[in-house]
Image (cartoon, rainbow, N blue to C red):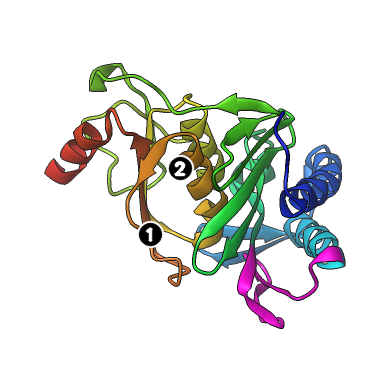
Amino acid sequence: MNVLSSNLNLMIKAGEKASKRLIRDFGEIENLQVSVKGPTDFVSNSDLNAEKIIIDELSKLKKNYSILSEEIGFIKNKDEKNIWIIDPIDGTSNFLHGIPHFAISIALQSHEEIICGLIFDPIKNEMFYAEKNNGSFLNNRRIRVSKKRVINECLFATNGIKYKNVDLPTRKTGCAALDMAYVAAGRFDGYFQESLNLWDVAAGIVLVKEAGGILNSINLSKKENLDIRASSSSISEKMLEKLDKF
């Protein structure tokens, strides 16, 4: 039986509580207040409400932990070595267009390492989670990366424009967190993307690792413009070869 830490149990509770509001809002999209952060970057009151719910829940038991969240930014508390990393809605554009492919992402960074992560798809009721040295799971079932070895039989996820013509079978889903969760679950064989934010991928980092996958070296002190390469060990070199040639 998989025994969860107090931190992960807290993350699950926070994610489940925020999801109830998101599911309700998703059914009333036309009523949401939306503002523009950038050319293709939007924030809705659903993002802000979900973020507040998550932070409030996490702070009940871990009030000294610092926080890095997409909308509110960095909150420095007494404990700067332990940091909650939160994306209240990864895949906001999907959410705002009524596309049921988005997720809540919560991770815990401790002493420059991601030690646990949660990615929750509230519409499909799929909760991916992982802890260091304890494996990756989907709804209490152990998951592992793909075992495929033939590159042309694989399917890769990417959302950037840099690799739009790369010689690999790809899908663009609009949700980096779920792309990495799907790599961990063996649904996608690999994922590559440039110019990501830490909150997009923090939970996915530990999920992929604990599912037996490998990633490029990621500097966690860098919060923006991160490049990610994630896959199983069996096709990593072949994937990187293709990307290096592009």
Q: Secondary structure at mark 1?
A: loop
Q: Residues within 10 Å of mark 2 (few under 14, many from 20)?
A: many
Q: x, y (%) of residue 214?
A: 36, 41
Q: Nearer the viewer, residue 220 or 155?
A: 220
Question: Image quadrant of residue 167?
Answer: top left
Which image quarter is the N terminus in?
top right
Considering only vertical position in the picture, is 200 above or below 159?
A: below
Q: Amino acid at mark 2?
A: Lys
Q: Identify the residue at image location x=77%, y=54%.
A: 46
The residue to which callout 1 is attached is 218
Highlighted range, magenta: 61-84
Q: x, y (%) of residue 218?
A: 38, 59
Considering only vertical position in the picture, is 108 above or below 26?
A: below
Considering only vertical position in the picture, is 46 above or below 118?
A: below
Q: Identify the residue at image location x=82%, y=45%.
A: 25
The residue to which callout 2 is attached is 209
In 3D space, how far apart are the residues under numbered discs 2 and 1 (Cα atoms)?
13 Å
Q: Is residue 126 magenta?
A: no
